Amino acid sequence: MKKVNYRNFSISSLFFGLLFSITFSFSATAQEGDPDVGKGLYNTYCAACHRLDKPMTGPALRYVEQRLYDEQGLDRQWLYSWIRNSSALIKSGDAYANKIYNEWNQVAMNAFPQLSDTDIDNILAYTAQEPPAPAVASVATEGEGNSGGSGVSEKLILGALAVLFALLAMALILVRQTLNRFAEAKGVQIEETKTTPIWKAFVQNQFLVLVTSIIFLLASAYYVYGYFMQVGLDQGYMPVQPIHYSHKIHAGDNGIDCNYCHSSARVSKHSGIPSLNICMNCHKAIGEVAESTATAEYSKEFYDGEIKKLYAAVGWDEATQSYTGKTQPVKWVRIHNLPDFAYFNHSQHVSVAGIECQTCHGPVEEMEIMYQHSPLTMGWCINCHRETNVKVQDNEYYAKIHEELSKKYGVEELTAAQMGGLECGKCHY
Amino acid sequence: MSSNKKYWKSVEELDQNSSIVETLKQNEFVEPIPTDEFLGNKESLQNSATTRRDFLKYVGFSTAAASLAACEGPVIKSIPYVLQPEEIIPGVANYYATTIADGYDFASVLVKTREGRPIKIENNSLAPTNGHANARVNASVLGLYDSLRVKGPKKDGQDISWEDFNSEITSQLDKLNAEGKAIVLLTQTFASPSTDKLVSQFKEKYATAKHVIYDAISHSAALDAYQAKYGTRGLANYDFSKAMTIVSVGADFLGDWQGGGFDSAYSQGRVPKDGKMSRHIQFESNMSLSGANADKRVPLTPSQQKLALAKLYSYVVGTSVSGSLPEKIDTTVKNAAAEIKKAGSNAVVVTGIDDVNAQTLVLELNEFLGSKAFDPKTTIKTRQGSNEAVAQLVNDMKAGKIGAVIMSGVNPSYTLPNASDFNEGLEKVSLSVASSLKEDETSNRCTYIAAAPHYLESWGDVELKKGHFALMQPTIRPLFNTKQFQEVLMSWLGIDDTYHNYIKAHWSETILNGTSFSDAIHDGVFVAENSTENSTVTTSETSEVNEASSSTGDAARKLVAAVGNVDGFELALYTKTGLGDGQQANNPWLQEFPDPITRTSWDNYITVSKFDADKLGLINRNVANGGLNGSYANITVNGVTIEKVPVIIQPGQAIGSIGLSFGYGRTEGLKEEMKTGVNAYKVYQDFKVSQAVSIEKAAGEHEFACVQLHNTLMGRGGDIIKETTLEIFNTKDKAIWNHTPMVSLNHIETPVSSPEVDLWDEFDRSIGHHFNLSIDLNACTGCGACVIACHAENNVPVVGKTEMRRSRDMHWLRIDRYYSSEDTFAGDMNKKENISGLTSSLSEFREMEVAAENPQVAFQPVMCQHCNHAPCETVCPVAATVHSRQGQNHMAYNRCVGTRYCANNCPYKVRRFNWFLYSQNDEFDYFMNDDLGRMVLNPDVTVRSRGVMEKCSMCIQKTQKTILDAKRDGRVIKDGEFQTACSSACGNGAIVFGDINDKESKVADLKKDDRMYHLLEYVGTKPNVFYHTKVRNTTEV
């Protein structure tokens, strides 16, 4: 861990050096923009076709101004006109503009006449920024430290208690010995009452034996029942998937809405495993993870490798940025399996009831590896139907039945059960 | 490598003569093993705690324990699309409009697909013609997943590539063409404008090419008559909803007459409205669906029918013909004629006699009447075959005149009466190609098989009737390496395009008239705007009528003359609702579908009247295991004998006639289980459905799979099928003809429906939905489309013939058929009322078990009645069947332990028990036993396992879906949105489903109707299914 830190440090110091040199060289040619404002503009206008460090639809833009200045001797004015209307510049016969145009498959860049000089300055300032130094390792160590701390404190309390009890016991024994010694010294005869040992007394007391054995039997029946009820349940089922897909990164860190990928959950009984073209909506542009995404457990290389697996499956050639047409469908391992005789419809719960996915699927946004969070038993379903109120607001379908049922039950809010959600045939047909 | 080193174990070995060493060398063990002590002592062995049995128990236990411990749940893989098609959402059904045109059935349908798999056929409500799928069309989706389909092109039974296939055939065709040898396209009726164009292009390229259209079941007579009169080859159209008096002579127009599709219009006229309904008189020999629905049915032999038609004509028009009918029949014909005359243009006459004169007569008669129901302008195009052309072809083939035969959609080696001649001729043909779905009787004898796709995988267009076009579009990518006939023709013609584009181009040019092709594809149908106006059919002027009538007076005379002298039996060949012409013989749904009339499945048989059966010594009897057995008979037509045909005694069969259905007796291209019945095409000589026949009894008894052994109502019309006549219905109070059963409460007669007599507290069903199903017995023709639709929707298994025979059929919906024992059901009621318990009750009840010679017939669809006070629910020990607020009686399969108490306590006998595992079980090798066949299963309905009870769920998966859709859209459900499989399949409007808490709904209105009653109402089960009293129009002139 230390070693990594050290290396990171050395790399970042190198970056700092670079940054210094760049800022100095920049200040010579151009006025400053605000990189933070620039970031927003960049993401709005440029990010669809350009990445900072890698070519995409268009060339990589990191240090673009510096590069143009160094290599072509072009100044910011050229960039203004290029960005505002590149095709005009090409038509005007500008040599470099035509060169770029031909290099990038003769696809002209979109015109952005709405961008002011300041906007472009800001964007350029953003592109001139240093790539952020990875801060993964430190985050990870911090996390560990925290969790360790809480563990120790619990153990400490327990240990202290144990010592305390031991001391108490010792004290009691000592007190007894001292008292005995006093008695001997004073000549008091302690009557040796003939007491039967407790276990013998217990055995002799038939009532106690009976009660105990009943309790014992009940308890074991409880546990045996509990054990058998576990059979066939897959709560916590966490299979290894062909591609290590992290819900934590997608739904958690990047906050992608569940329905973006699982779109059929809104209209269908199946939430649907997203087809690979959905993945490619983003991963066309995201060929590797950011340094900050890597964790102690999973390195950046590992994640990048998983993205490569996606590319192989969908038949995406990174070099040419095109589909090869050779696909290998991914055989995911299905985690949530309902038996054939139970009907469950996602759209009923997601669209109609407006239930959060996490209610049943647990903290998916924290799951590095997806697992089955809920038991998916009938009892679990039923409990929820008993407790959950039906969302009837602004739904004309419910208007009449809600009015009548709330009058019948004398309540304002109706549970799914009152609505008829416990009837066998609602789920079994 | 050997070593010379010697290893020693003790110093003793140094002494070469040591006895110890010697002894040790001989014995492996230093100390003797106490084997004798162990095995020799039998006593101790017997006393040993571990006996051999115990040992086996231990082994068994440890094996079981070990394997149990090693048990893990199966790993289920889930494979999403790489590129998901936009229109497919897993779990949501898509519907596509398409058209079936297999040469026998033509219909515009909607195809329900799930995840890209077609799983059900529905009616296309946009279609003005043939928009209702019959039982066969409903079942046709299963044909797509037939495991015996031919999976790629073949030559002499070997696989071949399409490239080789096409190049070999084109070179041969070129050669034959150069030699001047005839090339014949022998096809089904396509009625397809685009195919017609292709065929004419083919004829242009190959000068010697000829197109012969062959309908397995010929309509040549009607076609010839129509062609002679109106100039085009086709059939006259009829709209029975416009007819108040319908007289049919031998036309089963509710069945397959003229391609079928007339029943929904007929049903419209059968429901009494404003005191009026149509009157239907049927003259026929076999008991057909039409005869069963008729108000008056007259059994006549085929030759008597010809006479009757001629007489009818003469009585109406006022000419006279010779020939004599028995007086009683003559009077009936006279009465019918009087009714026709009275009805005038509201009357219509149809006939199924395959005689040009008879058909001409009917066309003339309808024109004479100016019948509103008669529509000769909208020519039906779905039958175009010609008997002469086919007969000529067979002769030419035998004579070696034909160079090539290219077939599509036909199976002449099975369907031709002279199939052996055809087969002989086929061997003399140098190039034989069959475009076929199967390796069937014909394609197996051809050199090349052009593997054809199912219609659900094909493009196509059909002109069902003049100006009424329909489009066929694929609903799934071809499952196998198949090319449709048209595509094959196109590649032979060197047209490098898809058939889709070809159709599109042709339609844009000639049919669409500027409207959008995409819209036409979406609707599946297209009606040309000015088709009828532009029609060139000449309607006869008044003066011509007289001329025509005199000429048809001729026809009438010819018809009578053609009758000749008939002695002995007459055979009337017919098609069954289930198998039709036999194309779908490998379809287990249709094989298991009980015939609406005989209620027998998995067989064809000759139907004989009781009178003739007694004469010939033929019997039917019920045997101890609940099965029906019948005699065998050999029948001989003109020297051709079919041996061992099972016999069913059919009430209503005209004396002197027997019936036998087509479609059975297939031998190739189908599973062993499906090779049922005898091939009636063998006696279809000269393509005549009526033949002189001789019968003799054969040895042995046939085991039928008949699901209804009790045929009569026993005078219980008031409980089961309520009936009345139009006269009573119009004039009398409801209490007279639709009487609510009374029970005694404190010695006071109280209606059974009143709450006071109830043992149970009524649930409050006023909130939410309350589903009811209405069945109008007047509109129901018994066609059975609902039975197959239910089969497809609810994953109902097929159990096979032996299980059917044991009454273990799994149909959730059955259509009971009852015969009257007296002449009418009313007569039965009277007889029962008057039976005295003291004297002759036993014998008279026995008499009532026997159906009359010409009985009244009634159909009644029965499914779970979803009783509000369900007897099944109270007896279930595990509460697996319970009631819902929505009126549906739920059945939780996973809860059921199979006690079958519920089935025993059900008064309607609608519960079905899974005696076996019917899916993935080699003992039941039907569609559920192969991966392909299981693709038809509805993913929203559980496939039931062994040992559980099942029954109609009132399509709860469909009602729940409708509710969910409305909830998602946040709207109120409109009337008509709720449907069950049966109600949406019923093209006749007999089955209506809906929510009675929606007071505006149609079903709520129907429930308030005076004709409404419940099945076995006196039991007090309060069903959510109700029926409408059958009204018969017995008003004679």
Image (cartoon, coloured by chain):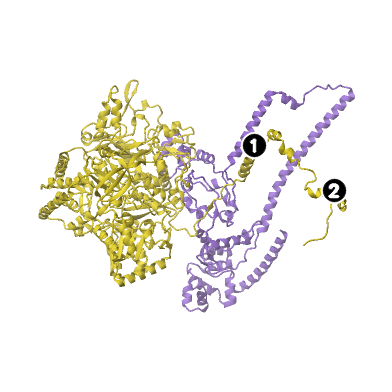
Chain colours: A purple, B yellow
Quadrant the C terminus of chain A occupies: top left
- Element marked by disc 1: helix
**With respect to residue A279, does A152 lie above or below?**
above
Question: What residue lies at 80% left-to-right and 61% top-to-bottom?
Answer: B3
Give the distance between the C-alpha atoms of the residues marked 2 and 1, in whole angstroms: 47 Å
- Residue B454 appears anywhere in the view: yes
Count neighbours of disc 1 (C-alpha within 10 A) and say few if under 14, some if 14 to 19, many if 20 or more. few
B663 or B550: which is nearer to us? B663
A404 or B906: which is nearer to us? B906
**With respect to residue A382, does B926 lie above or below?**
below
Q: The residue under label 1 is which amino acid type?
A: Asp
Q: Is residue B327 left or right of residue B855?
A: left
Q: The residue under label 2 is which amino acid type?
A: Ser
**Extreme-top residue of the structure:** B747
Q: Are marks 2 and 1 on the same chain?
A: yes
A300 or B232: which is nearer to us? B232
B868 or B432: which is nearer to us? B432
| Location of residue B211 in the rendering, given as x and y in whole percent from the top left corner | 28, 63
Count neighbours of disc 2 (C-alpha within 10 A) and say few if under 14, some if 14 to 19, many if 20 or more. few
* Residue B387 lies in quadrant: bottom left
Front: mark 2 or 1: 2
Residue located beneath label 2 in the image:
B19
First in sequence: mark 2 or mark 1?
2
Residue located beneath label 1 in the image:
B54
Q: Chain of mark 2?
A: B
- Element marked by disc 2: helix
